[in-house]
Image (spheres, coloured by chain):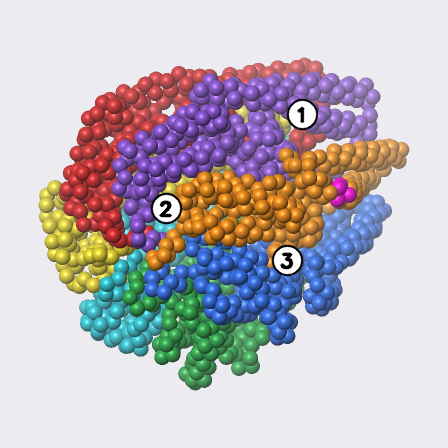
Chain colours: A cyan, B yellow, C red, D purple, E green, F orange, G blue
Amino acid sequence: MNLVWPDTAIEILLICVLALLARGLLKRLIKRWIERTAKRVEEPGGGLSSRAAAMIAQAGGLSVERQAHRTRTVGTMLGSLVDASLALIVVFMVLQALGVNIAPALASAGIGGIAIGFGAQSLVKDVISGLFLMMEDQFGVGDHVDIGTLNGTVQSLGLRATRIQDSNGEIWYVRNGEIVTLGNRTQGWSNANISIPVAYSEDPRQVISLLTEVCRGLAEEPEWAEQILEPPKVLGMSELAAGQANYLIVVKCPGDQQWAVEREIRARVMTAFQDAGIKAPLTLPAGPAS
Amino acid sequence: MNLVWPDTAIEILLICVLALLARGLLKRLIKRWIERTAKRVEEPGGGLSSRAAAMIAQAGGLSVERQAHRTRTVGTMLGSLVDASLALIVVFMVLQALGVNIAPALASAGIGGIAIGFGAQSLVKDVISGLFLMMEDQFGVGDHVDIGTLNGTVQSLGLRATRIQDSNGEIWYVRNGEIVTLGNRTQGWSNANISIPVAYSEDPRQVISLLTEVCRGLAEEPEWAEQILEPPKVLGMSELAAGQANYLIVVKCPGDQQWAVEREIRARVMTAFQDAGIKAPLTLPAGPAS
Amino acid sequence: MNLVWPDTAIEILLICVLALLARGLLKRLIKRWIERTAKRVEEPGGGLSSRAAAMIAQAGGLSVERQAHRTRTVGTMLGSLVDASLALIVVFMVLQALGVNIAPALASAGIGGIAIGFGAQSLVKDVISGLFLMMEDQFGVGDHVDIGTLNGTVQSLGLRATRIQDSNGEIWYVRNGEIVTLGNRTQGWSNANISIPVAYSEDPRQVISLLTEVCRGLAEEPEWAEQILEPPKVLGMSELAAGQANYLIVVKCPGDQQWAVEREIRARVMTAFQDAGIKAPLTLPAGPAS
Amino acid sequence: MNLVWPDTAIEILLICVLALLARGLLKRLIKRWIERTAKRVEEPGGGLSSRAAAMIAQAGGLSVERQAHRTRTVGTMLGSLVDASLALIVVFMVLQALGVNIAPALASAGIGGIAIGFGAQSLVKDVISGLFLMMEDQFGVGDHVDIGTLNGTVQSLGLRATRIQDSNGEIWYVRNGEIVTLGNRTQGWSNANISIPVAYSEDPRQVISLLTEVCRGLAEEPEWAEQILEPPKVLGMSELAAGQANYLIVVKCPGDQQWAVEREIRARVMTAFQDAGIKAPLTLPAGPAS
Amino acid sequence: MNLVWPDTAIEILLICVLALLARGLLKRLIKRWIERTAKRVEEPGGGLSSRAAAMIAQAGGLSVERQAHRTRTVGTMLGSLVDASLALIVVFMVLQALGVNIAPALASAGIGGIAIGFGAQSLVKDVISGLFLMMEDQFGVGDHVDIGTLNGTVQSLGLRATRIQDSNGEIWYVRNGEIVTLGNRTQGWSNANISIPVAYSEDPRQVISLLTEVCRGLAEEPEWAEQILEPPKVLGMSELAAGQANYLIVVKCPGDQQWAVEREIRARVMTAFQDAGIKAPLTLPAGPAS
Amino acid sequence: MNLVWPDTAIEILLICVLALLARGLLKRLIKRWIERTAKRVEEPGGGLSSRAAAMIAQAGGLSVERQAHRTRTVGTMLGSLVDASLALIVVFMVLQALGVNIAPALASAGIGGIAIGFGAQSLVKDVISGLFLMMEDQFGVGDHVDIGTLNGTVQSLGLRATRIQDSNGEIWYVRNGEIVTLGNRTQGWSNANISIPVAYSEDPRQVISLLTEVCRGLAEEPEWAEQILEPPKVLGMSELAAGQANYLIVVKCPGDQQWAVEREIRARVMTAFQDAGIKAPLTLPAGPAS
Amino acid sequence: MNLVWPDTAIEILLICVLALLARGLLKRLIKRWIERTAKRVEEPGGGLSSRAAAMIAQAGGLSVERQAHRTRTVGTMLGSLVDASLALIVVFMVLQALGVNIAPALASAGIGGIAIGFGAQSLVKDVISGLFLMMEDQFGVGDHVDIGTLNGTVQSLGLRATRIQDSNGEIWYVRNGEIVTLGNRTQGWSNANISIPVAYSEDPRQVISLLTEVCRGLAEEPEWAEQILEPPKVLGMSELAAGQANYLIVVKCPGDQQWAVEREIRARVMTAFQDAGIKAPLTLPAGPAS
């Protein structure tokens, strides 16, 4: 406590000026970083027809304002973090300049830091992941997402945990740090993949032409055309097993809306096969089958 | 121990004033943090009919008072933690100011801290997780939850472990840190998914109209209407395999109450099929089947 | 070793007084903590009939004295730990006050602490888990528990490991830190779940009434009534597969005593079906089956 | 090296006296700890008949002398460890008192300690686990043990690894730290569980009485009585599947000796069924089966 | 703050000169490292025919300019990192030379570093992995990649996460640190592997000659020749099971374009077999099959 | 650099003497440790007949000289390690005594140690494991070993990795630290376990006597007797499934030589069954089977 | 900065001399280590016939020059590492001797080291693994390797990652640290294992003699003899299941060239069986089979 006033005063002044400079610098860095990462990917569903692109563009418009809201949130939060850290450092340095021995306080904090650090690492990990999930706009409230074995609609997106409602209505809480690989069905489109089993003895050319006809018919009905982004593709014989052959139909639909199209095509194909006399695998006249 | 009384006195005074200031600040921060996180999500089951919303709103009312109780608990606990930490620091700093060498005590504490830190990290993790499970109101006593391979009714919710009773009556103790992904059936609704297998040769249109009729009949009976949140949906042919076709019915029910509805619809569909002569897959007159 | 006697004496005195104060404080904290955690959950099997509650209450009475024994053990152990730690610190501080340089000893201990800390973390983890298993009364000697892939009767409960005998008589040693999720069948009840397969062509109403009759008959016999906590429930058709339908019966029995009830109901149902002419799935007169 | 002889001498003396005191204390603590943990669990196979208890008591007698041998080994080893640690500390402290700067040596040791600590943690873990496996007498040479996917007879038990010979004669080396959950068949008993498949159409009462008769006959023959600890139990119909019913017989045998009993009962039951005309599942006169 | 001006000035000058030298050195090292790692592997699909090589060479050309873009990005980023680090060090050293005590600031940073280090390790890991994925040119935007259970087309490649669209249109975000083993179908070629099941009784020589003929026919049609890099190979009987034999055809196609070829060959083989009377396994005239 | 020559000289002398003493002590400790661990387990295959013991004893003789070679290798290596460590410490301490400030070098080494320690822990782990694999003589070149999913003949045994050739000829490199549980077939014996399926209707007594006869015949032929350590055991009916019964034969053979015996017994049993008219399961005259 | 010139000069000189000595020593140690590890295992495929050995010897010759190239690469790299480390230390020590306070720089480096160390450990691990993969010559460019679930031909071998092309043409990048167990098919040989299913009723002696004849015929044709290292072995009946028996043929082929041999033998055996009238399992005249 042997304070030499002029010296001490100069030192404290120097500390404060430096802290202010550092604060300004860090704030500007944060702002620039947010601006750079905030630029959204322009083409959300590359390689689509113009109509499909238009359909997804609307979602993009919504996403932009969602993004603005988010960057503001993240910026404010990081700003407070910088203020708190600098305040802590300035207090410690001024105390030191005044001659108060702060080693004990620091030591306690160090021990506490280690003890908690071991246990809290998953908490810190969750928050960092949440920050990046927000910054990178991987998903927003209302999106349909795939997270590991769980998929559903995002209800809220917090820094530590995300709330998702699955298709059965159950509410799920997922820690952000556990979201390693995330699929977003709303940002892209969804393919309806329909596999049609046919008896081995049927002629592949006839089956394919029949399937093509059914698909064209469906795509031309206005009711269904809204749910189909591109003309359905009949890909041909995808599998050849004992006693049966499988044909694959693929239809590009808007995100997470392929289920009704799949069911409709399946029902129409079955009717068409019954009309044309194309046999299903193993439905022999008088033989049992498992 | 060369105490220079005025100096030392000033230093101790300064330490105490600072500690009190820090305490006040931290308490206010905790209070504000609890208040902010305590605001419950307003719309618990977004996208429901008004009747269903009303049914869940009641649960919401209960949850609010549950929340109040919890935030008080958490606030008290965090407050004691702050008091204890500050007391420890003040004691160390006053001792230092008085000239007692506390390095040995700190060193021992440091070694102990490392040794225990390695082993106790799962304990710290459990407590932090428990704190957040409470703060985020992920579940309460009486809720039906899904935790990994285990699901059941919450009996009590501690800081370290949660007590759950599964549907067979067994009592389970789960450490909070192990609850990575948590599903809550009581906060949402539950879908009854009924898959009806039919012979390949039946006409899909007829089957669907029959199923629709059965479902409408059920939903109109007052006894069952209470257990159904929205009119049942017959989704059509969901699967087309060798020799059989599957039709899917989905009924939205209150959380965890879908089982009776599922069984009832299944029994009614079977009776209706027998009346209408719709064949089940593979029930041929005199052939064996596996 | 430049000892200034009055100063040194005062310092040593101060150290000892402080240590005694700390010891008193810690002991009181431990006592209060044990008392708080020792309060057992009052209602062990919530939602049972009065008779069932009475049956479990007896076990509760036993458990209370088991608890008293345990808290005494834990309290004594923690007390010795506090004494040892404080003694170590006092010795180091007095040595320091006397001018003996103890840095080398501390350094060695530090190195040793790190080296062993890495390897011994699972040991520390086992002991901490054991402490909490005891404090939270998750299970006691004689309880039937489920631990991961292993289940059996607890033979002894140590701080590091638990000894369990499975139903085949094999003795198992499980490290407490590996007990992540623990199920206790003795603290709750056990459901007997009996699934009855019936031919697809049988009338569901008739099957259910027959099953209900069999169950009521069983529950009324005094010999079996002791092993059934609540009247058996016939839940109806739980599954509808190709060629067969399954009916589910659920009976609430005291913990781990459901096996005999399951077997008895199964045998009685089979006899009743044979009398009533209800066909089992796939037992056709002259057809092969797999 | 400014040695002030009287002071230095006193310091060195003080160090040595302290070290001797610490050594005595630690040795007594070790001895007491070994004595406490060495007390073997008295009742090895609780709930057995007196004859069975007598059979296992012999093994217990052997185990006591095995235990004595072990505690001596462990005590000696821990004692040397204490001596080595104290010697190291005394050397460092005397050097310091003599004024030799030992910081470099300590620093090197610290770096080495960290570098090796990371890599050697599984070695330390193995040794600690081995120490506790010995102290807790989880198994001895000649016991039949289950360790994860491996089971066999223990050939030798080292501090780092255990040598086991499986039933096919292969020698296995298992690191002690990898032994998480250990089953010992020699310390308990072994149940012979025999499942008997019978055709769906047979009367359960008749089947059970026949099985009971076969079991009673076996248990009365002196040749087999030695291998059976308690009268065999016919538990009734344990499973009801399409076309068949399963009956369960349980026989309590001495540890790991149930195999011959299982095979004998199976052969006798088959003969008895052929005599009584009870049909096996699916052995229809002229039908194929898979 | 006892500043001795000439000395301090010299020290500060020395620090600055040194920092500039270090900066120059590091920048040159980075440049040289980038140049060395940027040299792309010359022969992308070793062992191809000249036509196939030419087809892939085009892709290589594109890749070179992609590479140039990338190395510039990485170089700039690493350069900024070096500048920031050196600036931080210079600031600290000048402050120290001026006599400002910076220990508190460093200590805070240290504690913060540890606390965050534990939680942020997966972030650092992601960025380092991203850096190397870029430097090693493992994949680029538009490539078709395999990452664990996920495969699809790369949409964008960030330092922390990669955006991939799978074949169903779903957008996936994968953290770079989780990409352990990565397969790139665009950089290589893709084999169409077609397995043809034939009845056990058919002559292998005849089957193989027929398959060879079908393949030669396909490879000669200009429409298909573009999608085939090398003449198809009929490898012969690859499997011999009960009742059937499998023949394997392998066709080398450009990356990820084998699907149409597979389907076409399968359809042609089936037609050819029907013409030649070669029987499929198990299509017996009047027998049931499972 | 204020060297006070006499003092410094004494200090350096003291350092050197101490180092030499420490070296001598450590070398003797290593030697004693090697000698103690080198004593091989005497009875390699406990409980064998004298002939079998003699056969394995030869291998034991070989193993002893293999062991001598190894302990020499390990001793030399550990000795060099001790020399290097002591040299490093002495250099640091002499430099310190001479007044050269070595803190920077130490600090660099410390940072490097941490940085590498994290990454190299699996390397250190591999070497430590290799050391112990050698010391404990778990396997030698030419032994047939089981390591997790891999088994084969050891080609060479290094400190970091082991080279194994599997039975298909592929060369495998396994890091020693990954060898957690190791099985050695050469040190023990190998059982040939032959399971014989028989039709449900056959008499168990007749089947067993027939099998016994076949086994006795084989064991008496000199050609096969060399490959059988003990008379084969026919264990009786090991399994009773729908339509078939399985009988188990066990033959004790020298390590990894059971395959030919298994095949021979299987062929002879089949011939004997055909002669005796014992039916295999499910070979009905005109019925299909799967 | 109180420089005492003669003293400082001597200290700097001493530092430089020491550094040069250390450099010389380390370089020589590296050289000797490389030379020792570079000695390739002499007998690559122990136990082969002379012709097979000659075939593999050629590969060995290639490998030696490959090895020379590699050791040069590794040596240069390690040398630069030593130079860089020593330069860093010398700079720090000279600065210290000159009186420049380098603590801040070191502290920053320490914090950075910790922060990056956590995240970069997998990078360091990859490089260390890569170094050892090279030194131990586990594989070279062009070898066919097995790495976990992936196998293919090595395209390039870097310090951090290895580039492999699988048999379908896809390019894979594998981080070296993830290569735990590596199989090399090129360094050894490959067995063709052909399993021949035969009807249960056929005579084993006849089947074996027929198989032996087919194998001898193949091995005598010059076209195939080049692809077979040793005469094929017919091992006899390897499996005995319900209704069928399996016979095993093993042929030793050069590394990864067994596929064509397998297919040829399978086709020839089928033809021979058809000629000799040996029945395949389950090809009954008029019965269905699954």
Q: What residue is shown with label 3? A: F171
Quarter that holds the C terminus of chain A: bottom left
Looking at the picture, do discs 2 and 1 lie on one chain?
Answer: no
What is the magenta range?
A: F60-65
Q: Is residue B237 above or below residue F6?
A: below
Q: Can you give x and y, in whole percent of width and height, for residue E200 in the image?
A: 42, 67
Closer-to-camera residue (D243/G226): D243
Residue at x 72%, y 47% (from the top left corner): G100
Q: Chain of mark 2?
A: F
Q: Chain of mark 1?
A: D
Element marked by disc 1? helix
Element marked by disc 2? loop
Closer-to-camera residue (A146/B94): A146
| Residue B126 placement, left or right of B271 | right
Q: Can you give x and y, in whole percent of width and height, for residue B14 in the image?
A: 52, 29
Residue at x 36%, y 51% (from the top left corner): A150
Task: Tell me if I can see residue B121 in this picture.
Answer: yes
- Mark 2 / mark 3, whichever is N-terminal: 3
Q: Gap between marks 3 and 1, in whole Å?
A: 43 Å
Q: Residues within 10 Å of mark 2 (few under 14, many from 20)?
A: many
Q: What residue is shown with label 2? A: F242
Q: Can you give x and y, in whole percent of width and height, for residue G289 in the image?
A: 35, 60
Residue at x 38%, y 52% (from the top left corner): F282
Q: Amino acid at mark 3?
A: Ile
Q: Gap between marks 2 and 3, in whole Å?
A: 44 Å
Q: Can you give x and y, in whole percent of width and height, for residue D113 in the image?
A: 67, 39
Q: Is residue F63 magenta?
A: yes
